[in-house]
Amino acid sequence: MGKEIELKSIFLPFLSTSHIIPLVDVARLFAIHGVDVTIITTPQNATVFQKSVDLDFSRGRPIRTHLVTFPAAEVGLPPGIEAFNVDTPREMVPKIYMGLSILQPRFEQLFHDLQPDFIVTDMFHPWTVEAAAKLRISRIMFHGASYLARSAAHAVEQYAPHLAAKSDSDPIAIPGLPDRLEMTPLQLPDWLRSPNQYTELMKTIKESEKKSYGSVFNSFYDLESAYYEHYKGVMGTKSWGIGPVSLWANQDASDKAARGYAKEDEGEEGWLKWLNTKAERSVLYVSFGSMNKFPYSQLVEIARALEDSGKDFIWVVRKNDKGGEGEKFLEEFEERMKESKKGYLIWGWAPQLLILENPAIGGLVTHCGWNTVVESVNAGLPMVTWPLFAEHFFNEKLVVDVLKIGVSVGAKEWRNWNDFGGEIVKAEDIGNAIGVMMSEKGEDMKRRSKTLSGAAKKAIEDGGSSHNNLNELIRELNQIKLSKAQETAPVP
Ligand code: UDP
C-alpha cells in the first residue's frame, strides 16, 4: 500500500537491548507494509538485530541499518561499550549518556540528510520531537511499556496516592483507573515515590509525547482495551497498539532464531532436544529478561524452588560471581539437573520466542518485562510473576489482577535495573506460586491464557485490531505526505 508513494522513515532505537528488540520488530512491520525503513544505531547495538534486518532485506523488503560510530574515545570508554545492558559496569553509565549526547547532533544531521517523511523514535530520545518539528515531519514515539503501566504511572504522578499510605508496605489504591489496583509505596518506581533526576526525564518524555504525532505500543486491543482508551483520554494524544510485534514480525523459525544474541543450531543438540523429550505443557520456562543479574543468595533460592517443585524446567541464568561460591554452586546444580534430566540451564541468552512456542512449555516464571508478558500471552501461557524494576510491578497488576492469568511470588520491593536491591524472595514463596500455576488450581488461568492467545493471533490478521491500527497509521502518514506535496506543487 505505502509503496506507490514511497513513504520514507527513520527508526531510532535507544542504546539498550531490551528497547532495541521490540522497536526493531516495529520497524520491520513498517517495511513489511512497503514503507522504506532506515534504522540508525551504533555498531555494537546493531549486533542485536542485524541478522533480522539482513533476512528481511533478502526477502526484498525496503529495510537497512545506518551505522554511526559511538564516540567511545571522546568520552573515555573502551571500544564496544555503547549500551545500557546487563553487563555494563555502573561507573560507565554516565559516560554512555555523554556519548549519546555527542551523538545527538549527528543523528539530527542524518535526519536532515536522509529526508524521511516521518521518524519513529524510542521514548528516551525526547529531543527528536524538536528535530522533527524543524524538518516539518511527524515524530512517533515508541513506548516499551503497557498502556496499563503508563496509565498507572500517570495516575500516581497526578494523585500521589502513596503520600496517604500509613507505611511503605501499606497497600494503597491507585485512583482514576478502570480497575481498582492496589500497590504499596515500596512497589512503586523510586522516581514516582519522590522526585529525582529520572522524574525530570520522564516529565520531558511526556511533554515530547504530547507534542508528537502519536505513539505506538507493543500491545493489542483485547489485551488491555480499557487502559488503551483510558490512556488516549488522559494524554489527549493519538496512540496505536500494533502488537504482538514479535509474532507479527517474526513469522517463521529463521526469524525467531535470528532474534537477539541466540546462536543458530544451538537448539539441535541442546535445549530443543531436551524439550522434545518432555510431555506437553509440563515444563516451566524461568527467565528474568535481558537486564537482570541476581546475587548468588537469590540464585540459591531459585534453584531450591525449582528442584523442590518436582517440575521440569528451563532456567535462563547469568553468572554473577566469577570463580566464587556462586559459580561453583550453579555448576554443581547444573550437573545434578543434567543427571536427573529435570532441568536445563541456558547461560546468558535464550531463543525465547522459539522456546515459548514449544508445546512442552506449560508456564513461565517471569520478571514481567513487557515484551515477555506479550510473548507469553501470545504463546497462551500462564505466568508466575516476579516483578523487579522499571514498570514491572504495574505489569504484574495487569497479569494477576486484571487478566487473571498469573500468580504472584509476592515481590515487595521495586529496585533499579542495575541494583540487586535488599529483597531476597524465598524458595517457599517461589515454590508455592509455581505449585498453583502448574496444578489443577491453575486451570482457570490456563484457560484464560489460551483465549488471549487466540485474540493475539487475531489482532495481527487482516481485519484485526493491530492490523487495522498499523494500516490506519500508515494511511494517515501517506495522507500527510500527499498534502505536503500538494502544498509545495507549483500553481499551474
Ligand atoms: N529475550 C530473549 N532471550 C533472553 C532474554 C530476553 O529472546 O534470554 C528477549 C525476549 O524475548 C524479549 C526481550 O528480549 O523480547 C526482553 O524484553 P522484556 O521486556 O521481557 O524484558 P527486559 O529485557 O526489558 O527486562
Image (cartoon, rainbow, N blue to C red):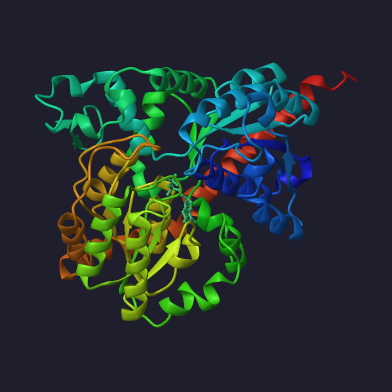
Q: Nearer the viewer, residue 250 or 353?
A: 353
Q: Is residue 71 above or below residue 490?
A: below
* Residue at x 15%, y 28% (from the top left corner): 168
Q: Outermost residue, right direction?
A: 492
Is residue 13 left or right of 1 when viewed as pictured? left
Q: Is residue 231 visible?
A: yes
* Residue at x 59%, y 20% (from the top left corner): 127
How many circles with numbers are drawn on the protein? Answer: 0
Q: Outermost residue, left direction?
A: 166
Is residue 288 left or right of 262 when viewed as pictured? left
On-image quarter of the C terminus: top right
Instruction: Give the quadrant of residue 253.
Output: bottom right
Instruction: Give the quadrant of residue 122.
Output: top right
Q: Outermost residue, bottom direction?
A: 277
Q: Is residue 337 above or below residue 160?
A: below
Q: Nearer the viewer, residue 436 or 138?
A: 436
Is residue 268 left or right of 197 when viewed as pictured? right
Q: Is residue 123 visible?
A: no
Is residue 3 left or right of 281 when viewed as pictured? right
Instruction: Give the quadrant of residue 81.
Output: top right
x and y percentages locating residue 383 in the rendered image? 29, 57
x and y percentages locating residue 429 in the rendered image? 16, 55
x and y percentages locating residue 389 in the rendered image? 34, 38
* Residue at x 36%, y 18% (from the top left corner): 196
x and y percentages locating residue 318 in the rendered image? 42, 54
